[in-house]
Every structure is written in C-alpha cells, then in structure tokens.
Amino acid sequence: MRVVYNFLVYIVLIISPLIIIYRVFKKKENPKRFLEKFSLQKEKRKTGKLIWFHCSSVGELLSIVPLIQELEKKKNLKQILVTTSTLSSSKIFEKFKFKKSLHQFFPIDNKFILNRFLSYWKPAALLLCESEIWPNLICATKNRKIKLILINARITKKSFKRWRLLKHFSKKIFKKFDVCFSQNTETKARLVKLGATNTKNLGNLKFTTSKNIKYDILDNKIRSFFKRKKILITGASTHFNEKNFVIQSHLHFQKKSKNIISIIIPRHIERVSEITKELNKFSLKYHTHSNQNKINDKIDIYIVDTYGELNKFYRISDLVFMGGSLIKHGGQNPLEPAKHGCRIIHGPNIDNFKEIYNKLNDMKISTKFHSYKNGIKTIDNKLKNKKSNFDNKKIINYGQKILKSTYTEIIKLI
C-alpha cells in the first residue's frame, strides 16, 4: 500500500506546477510563498528547542491558537513552527502577532521534500491536529526519533471505514504515534481499533477561546442596516435544499411580525443562484453581501455570498440554524456561533459533531428539531422566551479546562 501511495504522491508532484498555477489564478495560493510547499523557501530557524504544529486550515488553526499562546510562555521553548495548507489560514495566523511562532506552508508528503524540511527545522516534537494523517511524514518523523503526537484527534465514521479497508497499513501508521489525544470518546475507540497504542480523551480544543482574538466586524453601513431590522434567524453553512427551511420560516413569521429579516450563509457560494431562484418563487426580496449597492430596507433575505465572514454575522445574530443537519451530511460545527452567544437550532443529522451537540444541549444552548413544522415551532418558542439567551462564559470555562489538561500533557512530552 505504501508503494501505491508514494506513486500517487509522485504523480501529484509532477503535475503540481499546473495545480499551483491554477490555484494562484483562483487566488487560493500565495504566488510569493508557494515554494515553501517544496521546502525551497524558509523563514529563519532560531537556535534552541523548536516544536512543530501542523493543521489543515482555519478551523483547526483557531482551535490550537490558545494552546500556542500558552506554550509561548515557556522559556525553554525558543520557537514554534506552525504549518497549514491553505491561504486563508496563513492570513488568519498573521492576525495574532505571535512572538515565538512562525508560519510556513505544509510541504508535500514526499520523502525527499520532507527530509529536507526536517533537516532544516529539526523539531523536538511534531503535533498533528485532528485528522492530518500523512504516511510519509509520520514515517520520516519516527525514523528521526522525533516525538509524534496527534492532538485534538478526530476520526469520523466515514474516515474510520476507509482506514479499516487498509487495516494492515493503518496499523503500521497509527502505532507510530507516541500518544494520541482524542477530542471525543468515539474517536478514542476508533484510534485503538486502527492501531494506536496510547490514547487519551482530553476533549475538543475547539471549545477553547483565544484571549486576544479580534474578530472582524461588518462595515458601518451594513451594521446600521441590521440595527434597523429584527433578525429572525441566520442559516449558517446551509447545504442542498436547507435554504428552504430558512425561507419557509421567514414566510411563516412574516405574517406575524413586521420589519424582520433572515440571513442565509450557504456552505458553498456556488449555490447562490439556486437560492435566488427559490426566493423569486415566493416573491421574496433579497440582497447579496458582495453587492456594493445600497441595501433596500424592504429586503427579506440577506445572502452572504462570500467566504470567511461567518463570525461577522454571528456577532449580530441571536438564533442560528446550523446547516448540514437536515440532510445526510453529518452536520457542521456549531461552536463558533455558540462562543459568540448565539442560540443554536439544528436538524437530526449531526453524527460528525454528536458529542459537541450533546454538550451544547446540556448547557441549554442548542435544540434539535426533526421537520420544518417542528423547526418553526422551535423558533417560535425561542422568540417567546428571550430569557433563554445564555452566558457564553459556560463554554469559555469548559474550554479552559480542556486547554489546561492538553497543555499539561504536552509539557510532559516535550
């Protein structure tokens, strides 16, 4: 299996210039830094102990920021290397103004590129986040006797089934980890079955919050518009057909209340034309976020047709419907709106975030519904019971416990 994997990596390596040109054209790649992915362009490595974190993109990066902030206080730790794979995550990294930490783009999982990368940075430990399982990287790291840790590990049912198809291969890979810190009990059990020999369930780092994070806010004109309206519901990360729940809810409450507006934030902005067609069927007026024209005060639905702006809208929302839950997708992560103090409602399909939703339900933050009719009734109950607003300190305090236990365990290892 390793031979097949390496063959595929070489194919990717051969066509990588074309891939990078395409991504630069699509503004998904930094034209000045893409050589980092081949370990040909590097920041300066300081003398002393360095540890390396790798996470995929923005969500994973934000989950480890509080941990990095704590580790930066350790005097014997001279530098922290953080690699990610996306342009958006590199931009987010820059906002934190770290003192000891620096960012590089993740090198291609090719043994020659990785060996050049490891020879330069010489990390004392590699901490892979969530489900970033890269076979060549794991083997190269272990061969150099570098501590190998999987933090905030997350193995979904779908990925578990895939790994199980390669049972012998997966066992060879997962047993190389010195320790795996899972974010839930289901992942812990799956890691053991996949071959991990040392696992601990410490909880989900996505519950943690950075001390000095500064979220971007909407510009004054848009904020002024929303202050004049009553936001009924924000449909966040909606998938196929889920915009219909927001539309039907809006039509229902439009009969009872004046001056209401609903927000739809599709998971994929390619669905905007599909959404506008549906809105036209019901003669609902809408405005798209990318439209620079003045917003008509009589619009019914505000469509966010841009990426990376969810938090701006969570800041002005009270009630959020989390998408991916009314279809068989497994749900979307509700922690960001919850940390902003939003109440969450969701459909029944939340397998990918079951433990998070269970915790939010225990905290009286989230509510499940099974049908449009039941969902509309849930919204009505929330509107009538404004006292159900919660203090997001519940999540912050819970996150601090997870952060403390994770930090303690990592310090023991490095």
Image (cartoon, rainbow, N blue to C red):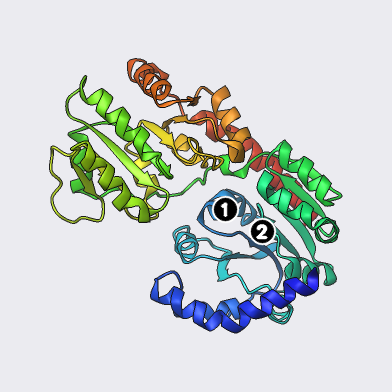
Instruction: Categorize mark 1 by other alpha carbons within 10 Å: few (<14), some (14-19), many (20+).
Output: some
Q: Secondary structure at mark 1?
A: helix
238 or 140, nearer to the observer: 238
Q: Secondary structure at mark 2?
A: loop
Q: Residue furthest front?
A: 281
Q: Which image quadrant for residue 170?
A: bottom right
Q: Position of residue 106 (x, y in %)?
A: 60, 70
Q: Is residue 398 above or below residue 22?
A: above
Screen quadrant of the N terminus: bottom right
Question: Which residue is at 75% across, 54% downward?
Answer: 163
Q: Position of residue 122 (x, y in %)?
A: 73, 73
Q: Is residue 79 left or right of residue 263?
A: right
Q: Is residue 143 visible?
A: yes
368 or 371, nearer to the observer: 371
Instruction: Categorize mark 2 by other alpha carbons within 10 Å: few (<14), some (14-19), many (20+).
Output: some
Question: Which residue is at 49% across, 78% downward?
Answer: 20
Q: Is residue 33 visible?
A: no
Q: Nearer the viewer, mark 1 or mark 2?
A: 2
Q: Which image quadrant for residue 82?
A: bottom right
Residue with the mark numbered 1: 60
How far separated are the C-alphas under marks 1 and 2? Answer: 10 Å
Q: Are marks 1 and 2 in contact (CB under 8 Å)?
A: yes
Q: Which image quadrant for residue 389?
A: top left
Q: Is residue 281 left or right of residue 371?
A: left
Q: Is residue 224 left or right of residue 58?
A: left
The mark found on residue 132 in the picture is 2
